[in-house]
Image (cartoon, rainbow, N blue to C red):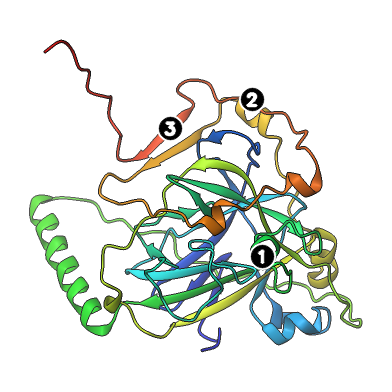
Amino acid sequence: MTDSTVRIDGNTLRLPGGVAVRFIRTLRLPETGTHPLPPGLGEFPVRRVADFPDTAPEEWRARGGVMLPVYLREAMWLSFAGTAEPAALQVGVGKVCAVSGKPWSDRLSRDPQNYLVLPRQPWLDGINSGKGTVRQFVAVPLGLGATVEGQVTGEEVWGGVQLQSFPLTERELTKWREDERRRSERARAITLSSGGYGGMPAMPMAAQAPPAPGAPAAAPRMGLGVGGSMRQEVYEDDRPLTSWAKEPAGRVFVHLVTPPEWRRITGEEPPPSPVDRAAYTRAGLPWFDYYDQDAEDLSPTDTLGAVKPVGDWLGDDHEPWQQPAPGQVQPLKDAKGKPVEDGAW
């Protein structure tokens, strides 16, 4: 299966089966301690490699896919907002599964689980490395051994991010759609009068001025290592594996580009350097906490739990850290509720 059915919609990647993926810029967490979810600071721009045949490296053109610009040690997370129907999504970092730590595969597995279940999983900020926590995705160059790929496999060959989607089987999808239709009819019966709502229509990707012609050069290759730990659950699938298609419906390779190479390849200016996290917190802007009371957290594997943060290669993180003030962390979805107090019996 090739990535021919994957589309770019603005800066959203749309994979077959209704899967929507956006790459979100964010604040880099300290590499010690466990923290709330950092904010989204806008989307990374995404472009097709095939649109730049004269400037994209030959190796990238052979792999196809898309590219986005990222700064050294910049953090990111993946948003799945807009995913319409249930889907299983595999996420690879240098062709290492970000959920299981196992090598990249074109088959779904439950022992250990090597995929996310959408739309239940609203986003992914890093590798599944602890019970109820993940370690943040952080961009680093290949060749240092700091990437997840380098630490898990002992080699740094692929870099980038890999995505692969699996829809429900026709039988399961038909059943799900019928259940959704019934729920919708019940909701309409309860809500006798409501205004219509519709999201803004997707805008086509703006045409870009072609860069100056020249021989494609080998670009510095980037991959994802890990940074700080945050409170986030990776949810266990509550469907049997037979509910999902055996073959992936679509896949895409996401190349990570340094800002100078982005400018050379595309002729576009890269986004500005990320905001200072202490300034963000001092301004009173929100951090987040997400909890789904109906979902079960997926236990991490020893492989990903042993991955070390990029600071072990790049040195200490000197960017100052300021703890969010009480009330600055906003709960999302289900509230965990206050603990029940016990007394004398």
Specify the amino acid type for callout 1: Glu
Q: Tell me which corner region of the image, top left, top right, bottom left or bottom right, holds residue 252.
A: bottom right
Of all residues shown, which one is farthest toward the right? 214
Circle 2 is placed at which residue position?
322
For marks 2 and 1, the one nearer the N-term is: 1
**Observer-nearest of 33 and 26:** 33
**Do labels 1 and 3 touch, CB within 8 Å?**
no
Tell me the number on the disc at residue 149: 1
Residue 97, position in %: x, y?
Answer: 54, 67
Q: Which of marks 3 and 2 precedes in the sequence?
A: 2
Q: Which residue is mark 3?
A: 330
Residue farthest to the bottom?
1
Quadrant for the C terminus, please.
top left
- 2 or 1: mark nearer the eye: 1
323 over 294 or under it: above or below: above
The residue that appears at 24% across and 51% down in the rendered structure is 195
Q: Is residue 273 visible?
A: no
**Disc 2 to disc 1: CB gap under 8 Å:** no
Instruction: Compute the Cα span from label 2 to label 3.
Output: 17 Å
Seen from the viewer's position, the closer of residues 31 and 211 is 31
